[in-house]
Amino acid sequence: MSPAKLSENIAVYNAMSSELEMDHNGKWVVIYDRAVSGYFDDETGAIQHAVREHGEGPYLIRIIGDVIAPLPASVVYEIAAPGVHI
């Protein structure tokens, strides 16, 4: 049997989101084959785990909750001064 589709893993996250936000807000989660595969402090750890354990996937990797991730300086600069090149 093949692993769950990405849309199924997203549905699992959505169904669990309240519980996940209460217990793991701000952490990264990997969901594979309709189940949580792990929680991580950073995106890199989540990615490394997903690839090591599940190969090419499909899996869902996302931050739990409404956490605002900082933008890289190059993106912020482009937003503040579009089209300006130094």
Image (cartoon, rainbow, N blue to C red):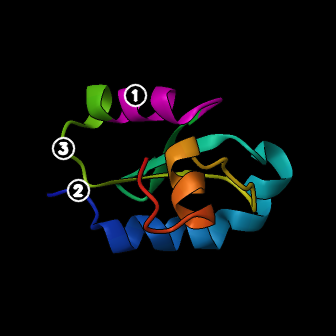
Question: Quick one: label 1, few (<14), some, or many (20+) residues within 10 Å?
Answer: some
Magenta-span inclusion, residue 79:
no
Kind of residue sitting beneath label 3: Glu
C-alpha separation, residue under disc 3 versus residue under disc 1: 12 Å
N-terminal label among 3 and 1: 1
Front residue of 34/39: it is: 39
Q: Amino acid at mark 2?
A: Pro
For disc 3, the marked residue is 56
Residues at marks 3 and 1 touching, judged by CB atoms closer than 8 Å: no
Query: Which three-letter amino acid code belongs to the residue tagged 1?
Result: His
In the rendered image, the residue lying farthest to the left is 1
**Nearer to us in this view, 55 or 44:** 44
32 sits left or right of 65 in the view: left
Q: Which residue is mark 2?
A: 3
Q: For the magenta stretch, what is the residue range?
A: 40-50
Determine the image quadrant of residue 19. Answer: bottom right
Percent x, y of residue 11:
49, 74
Point out the image quarter for the N terminus: bottom left
Instruction: Residue at 72% x, 56% y: name it.
Output: 68
Mark 2 lies on a secondary structure that is: loop
Depth check: 5 or 86 in front? 86
Label 1 element class: helix
**Marker disc for residue 49:** 1
